[in-house]
Image (cartoon, rainbow, N blue to C red):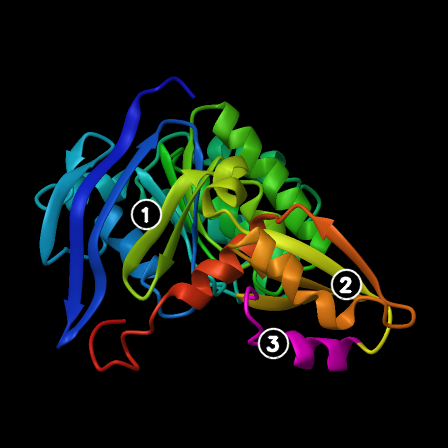
């Protein structure tokens, strides 16, 4: 990252009918960074990404993406962006090579064969170039979709739930590739629900029901949210959770494998809430440092669903 700002937008707002899906969203992203969007379904993540990259015109707001005005130069933005959607959207009855050749022609690229060869090699698709896209596994389809997004060497990569439905190894390989692109100066915006993907991002914006609740470097988010956590192991965890739910000082509980994390903003009140279960047979109570997942669960519990309120979503 060299400090150059690639995206600088202010007040982006989008309404569909009487619903405000994105409400005065600000975003500033430096070149080569990986910037994550997290939030519940319907929170406006995809709509925000589409406004930034010129696919959707905002009702309010202003700013630039790749130096182009988001309101008036959307065509220029789209020419320099790679956009990978959640659903596989390439031609399943074409081979890997045929799909990549098709996209290269769409962008009117020169040296077509060399570009396609490079795309195939860079994502480890050699030996599969004649295989039909429809016969690929989820992980290989993901690699092909990414190769198609990058065939025109875009400066900005937009990923909308990019690894939904693929196995953990394929997700790790995918993120290794994204990191390589970032080292070459490609900026990435990604929406995701996976915590192991969120930690790959340099910075995260948490969006809930159209509003940005938090925007910070990933490593700083737990401390900024200020949640305290206590891990409970052993005993009847369901009964313990039922007993602690709604107790004074307990903001929420979350199951983590064979333990429960009990979390709250007030450290002393949280510790006091443990009194009813202290000394229970087989129960172990240990203060732990709250992580990214606890921070986001807390943010989600604090956000109001504007659809339910009859307002925005």
Q: Quadrant of residue 309?
A: bottom left
Circle 1 SS class:
helix
Which callout, 3 or 1, points at the residue further toward the start of the chain?
1
- Please state the horizontal and vertical placement of residue 175, each as a whole percent of the image: 60, 42
Decide: marks 2, 1 in contact (CB < 8 A)? no
The residue drawn where x is 64% and y is 50% is 171
Residue receiving disc 3: 245
Numbered circle sitting on residue 106? 1
Q: Quadrant of the C terminus?
A: bottom left
Decide: marks 3, 2 in contact (CB < 8 A)? no
Residue receiving disc 2: 232
Give whichever of 285, 126 is nearer the camera.
285
- Please state the horizontal and vertical placement of residue 228, each as a whole percent of the image: 59, 51
The residue drawn where x is 33% and y is 71% is 304
Asked whether residue 287 appears in the rendered view, the answer is: yes
Farthest residue in the top direction? 2
Position of 311 compared to 134: left or right?
A: left
Instruction: Assess whether residue 22 is covered by the magenta stretch.
Output: no
Give whichever of 34, 252 is nearer the camera.
252
Q: Residues within 10 Å of mark 3 (few under 14, many from 20)?
A: some
The residue drawn where x is 17% and y is 43% is 10
User: Mark 2 against mark 1, which lies toward the viewer?
Assistant: 2
Count the labels in the image: 3
User: Mark 3 against mark 1, which lies toward the viewer?
Assistant: 3
Give whichever of 129, 153 is nearer the camera.
153
């Amino acid at each position: 990252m060299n400090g150059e700002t690639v995206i600088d937008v202010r007040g982006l707002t989008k309404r569909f009918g009487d619903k405000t899906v994105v409400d005065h969203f600000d975003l500033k992203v430096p070149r080569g960074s990986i910037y994550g969007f997290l939030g519940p379904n319907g929170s406006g993540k995809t709509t925000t990404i589409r406004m930034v990259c010129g696919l959707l015109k905002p009702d309010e707001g202003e700013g630039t993406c790749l130096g182009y005005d988001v309101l008036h130069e959307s065509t220029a933005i789209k020419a320099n962006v790679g956009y990978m959607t959640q659903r596989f959207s390439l031609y399943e009855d074409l081979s890997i090579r045929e799909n990549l050749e098709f996209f290269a022609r769409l962008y009117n690229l020169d040296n077509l064969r060399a570009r396609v060869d490079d795309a195939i090699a860079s994502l480890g698709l050699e030996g599969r170039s004649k295989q039909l896209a429809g016969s690929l596994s989820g992980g290989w389809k993901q690699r092909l979709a990414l190769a198609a997004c990058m065939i025109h060497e875009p400066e900005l990569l937009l990923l909308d739930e990019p690894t939904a439905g693929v196995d953990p190894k394929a997700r790790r390989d995918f993120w290794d590739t994204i990191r390589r692109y970032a080292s070459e100066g490609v900026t990435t915006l990604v929406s995701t629900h996976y915590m192991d993907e969120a930690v790959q991002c340099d910075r995260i914006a948490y969006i809930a029901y159209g509003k940005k609740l938090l925007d910070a470097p990933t490593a700083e988010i737990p401390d900024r949210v200020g949640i305290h956590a206590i891990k409970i192991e052993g005993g009847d965890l369901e009964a313990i959770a039922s007993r602690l739910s709604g107790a004074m000082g307990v903001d929420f509980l979350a199951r983590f494998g064979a333990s429960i994390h009990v979390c709250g903003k007030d450290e002393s009140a949280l510790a006091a809430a443990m009194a009813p279960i202290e000394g229970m047979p087989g129960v172990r109570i240990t203060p732990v440092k709250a992580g990214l997942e606890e921070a986001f669960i807390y943010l989600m519990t604090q956000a109001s669903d504007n659809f339910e309120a009859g307002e925005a979503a």
